[in-house]
Amino acid sequence: MSKSAEKSRKKEVKQSLIPIYIMGKKHEVPDSLTIQKALEYAGYQLVRGCGCRGGICGACGTVYRFPNSYRIEVGLSCQTVVEPNMYIAQLPFFPGNKATYDLDTLTATGSTLAALYPEMYKCIGCGTCTRSCPMDIDVMEYISRAIRGDIAGTAEASFDCVMCGLCAARCPAELVQYNIAILARRLYARHIAPPAKHLAAAVQNTRKGVFEEGVKKLKKMGTEELKKVYTGRITEPDIADEFWEPEDMTYLVSEKTR
Ligand code: SF4
Ligand code: SF4
Ligand code: FES
């Protein structure tokens, strides 16, 4: 951006600039920005602690507080809008306890969760994890289900978890809730959920080379042609029947075979 353009941009936003503190240093940033954009506006280059920018990947856990408040607040920096006098620190990585295991040798029972994460019994039911979760998950509830040995229930209640680590960062009992939850989801998928027939069929088709010709054609296309093919592809309508399928099923496995 040229110097004059930069000057006029700064003039435009001047009225709405607010002070925030990043790692203790004061910066003036537009009040409409998310914390993530404010960090960039202030000159930080986000190498860690940033991924999808859309509240999905969980890479951007952030802690902050306001002057004269004892409370530590948490949020995803790509979703949380700056407020005056925020003191902000990014959590590029949370060093949570992560068990290693061979999923095939485990049983889908509460004893497995207990053996790999015995600290879950230290939960004091304070609810801080639930209040910290940017995905509005009832984290304490899924931990209660894990403690009761309810694998399917834990998997279901934690399904929207983006693994941001904020619940663990705040837990007074030092649980790493998201790792307990992902183990439950893995156990559920591997040992409880019925095998997905359409997935097995799709894998078989891949092995048979069904997609190879199509891939070869795509590889030969230029950017514009690729764009045309992409924008012209058949997509599911906003309102579709439960078992909607496209007319051309060349590369797909029919619902009817599931
Ligand atoms: S923050 Fe920790 S101790 Fe508190 S309810 Fe959640 S898991 Fe239990
Ligand atoms: S459950 Fe924990 S790790 Fe998962 S999204 Fe909520 S706060 Fe983040
Ligand atoms: S960058 Fe992915 S959730 Fe914020």
Image: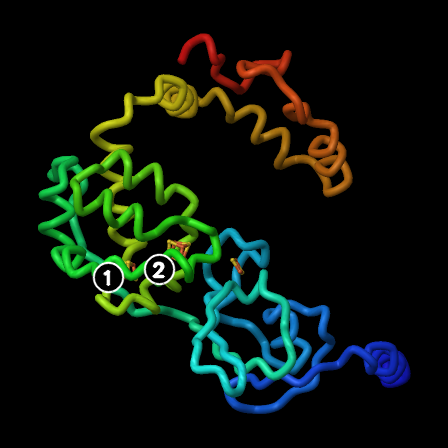
The crowding category of the residue bearing disc 1, from other C-alpha atoms within 10 Å (few below 14, some 14 to 19, many at least 20), is: many
Q: Is residue 27 above or below residue 183?
A: below
Q: Is residue 155 above or below residue 206?
A: below
Are the residues tagged 1 and 2 within 8 Å (C-beta)?
Answer: yes
Tell me the tag on residue 210.
none
- Cβ of disc 1 within 8 Å of ligand 1? yes
Describe residue 146's horizontal placement relative to residue 41 as left or right: left
Tell me the tag on residue 175.
1
- Front-lying residue, 112 or 200: 112
Q: Quadrant of residue 228?
A: top right
Give the residue pinned by disc 2.
129
Q: Residue lying farthest bottom?
A: 25
The residues tagged by marks 1 and 2 sit, at their Cα atoms, a distance apart of 10 Å
Q: Amino acid at mark 2?
A: Cys
Where residue 196 sits in the image (x, y, percent)? Answer: 35, 22
Image quadrant where one finds the C terminus: top left
Describe residue 145's horizontal placement relative to residue 72 as left or right: left
Where residue 79 sits in the image (x, y, percent)? Answer: 58, 61
> Which residue: 28% across, 21% down?
194
The crowding category of the residue bearing disc 2, from other C-alpha atoms within 10 Å (few below 14, some 14 to 19, many at least 20), is: many
> Which residue: 23% across, 67% down?
174
Where residue 41 sits in the image (x, y, percent)? Answer: 68, 77
> Which residue: 47% across, 16% down?
253
Describe residue 84's horizontal placement relative to residue 163 as left or right: right
Q: Is residue 99 above or below residue 189?
A: below
- Cβ of disc 2 within 8 Å of ligand 1? yes
